Image (tube, grey):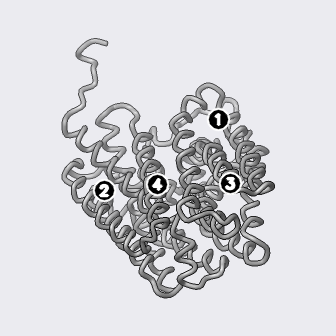
Amino acid sequence: MPASERRVVTTELKRARIGVALIFFTNGIVLGGFAPRIPEIRNSLELSYGGLGLAMAAWPIGSLLLGLAAGSLIRRYRSSRVATFGMSLSAIAMLGAGLAGSPLWFGVALFIVGTTDAWVDVAQNSHGLRVQRGYKRSILNSFHAQWSIGAVTGGLVGGIAAGAGMSVPWQFGIVAVFVIAVNAFAYPMLLKGPEPAHAGEEGADEAGIPHAATAPHTPLRRVPRHTWALLAALSVIAIAGGWAEDAASTWSASYLRDELSAGATLAALGFVSMQGCQFIGRILGDRMVDRWGQRSVARWGGLLVALGMGLAIAFPSVWGTIVGFGAAGFGVATLIPGAMHAADQLPGLRAGTGLTVLSWLMRTAFLLSPPVVGAIADSTSLRTGLALVPLMGVLVFLLAGAMSPPQGTNLRPLGSARQS
């Protein structure tokens, strides 16, 4: 390549890349540290599985109701400030969840966590896209990899802390101090200057956060029925991926401890296994899709979820369950990004409309998942509630054909025009 065409990456861009990676890492570590301590929180608040599920629903409610404010916050305060300050607020709110003395205050704290997490999600992706434009090549996946590493790290920390007998408030307090310090360190490294006018919208796209700016009014009568059918199938695929992730984060530790008698540290490995294998799947995902196509990758991913979790539930054991969650994590690794991209390419819909509809449905499923599984667990067992995960894998296997765009469709990769 001629010297004149070589990409020059400035020191400012390199520093900003490190800063964004640190924010993604801390975002992952907060959720990761929470998942292994859910059984203790449930016991301390004397909640049934159904009660826990209802309280956990406060997280996606906050995301759905107030997450829409992310774009206006970014336009007013810049993505760098929203991401770092929001991440600090999120960690403090999680500490509030650990300190909560009643289900009501636990739900209130999770509502704030969900709200701030949605703001951070959009802002960190918006800033990551600014850095990516400076690099003139794709680097956004590396940021999401940092989130996965943070989630695995948080899960291990939470499991070790639980096994060592450290109280939930102490762990969450230490994590909050760490998160605030890291984000204070990261903030000066981020890019200065005004945000692009479309920063909030493109960040919301990548984060999968619904936002009104990308939902233009398309006359429904002009949209072919086949397009609606494809969008419905893609939405089910995205929901299946989200349902499996929520099963690991909300229920894996409780299932391993309560029904399989695993110790606190070992019980944390269900979530760690899911996140670790999902990380590997996303690192390999682009190559797999390039070689075999999104349809085949999704179909085999659904089969892996169905078999991995199905066998783990049919023949329950501690290590079999941990392996099953890992198989599910690898299987769903590309489902949500792939479904989002395919929805954004559907013919007959304006750019962004399919993506917004899918995002709303997926976030609604995150809202329903904890109460539904909790209600099933109360009436039968948590093992029965988790049996919905292999069922989701079967649905993905059956609907994977929707992941391939119709012949002759002009592809517009998600984020190529708007670039989370």
Tell whether label 1 touches label 4 (CB within 8 Å).
Answer: no
- Earlier along the polypeptide chain: callout 3 or callout 1? 1
**Position of the N terminus by quadrant:** top left
User: How many badges with numbers are in the image?
Assistant: 4
Helix or strand or loop: what does disc 4 sit on? helix
Q: Quadrant of residue 344?
A: top right
Disc 1 residue crowd, few under 14, some 14–19, many 20+, Cα 10 Å: many
Place of residue 398 in the rendered image (x, y in percent of width and height, measured from the top left): 79, 45
Per the image, the residue denoted by label 3 is 321
Instruction: Give the CA distance from mark 4 to mark 1.
Output: 26 Å
Q: Nearer the viewer, residue 277 or 333?
A: 277
Residue ID for mark 1: 294
Badge 4 local density, few (<14 within 10 Å), some, or many (20+)? many
Residue 174 left/right relative to 374: left
Q: Look at the numbered discs 2 and 4 and tell me whether their residues touch, using CB distance below 8 Å.
A: no
Horizontal side of residue 23 vs 364, given as left or right: left
Q: Earlier in the sequence, mark 4 or mark 3?
A: 4
Residue wearing tag 4: 151
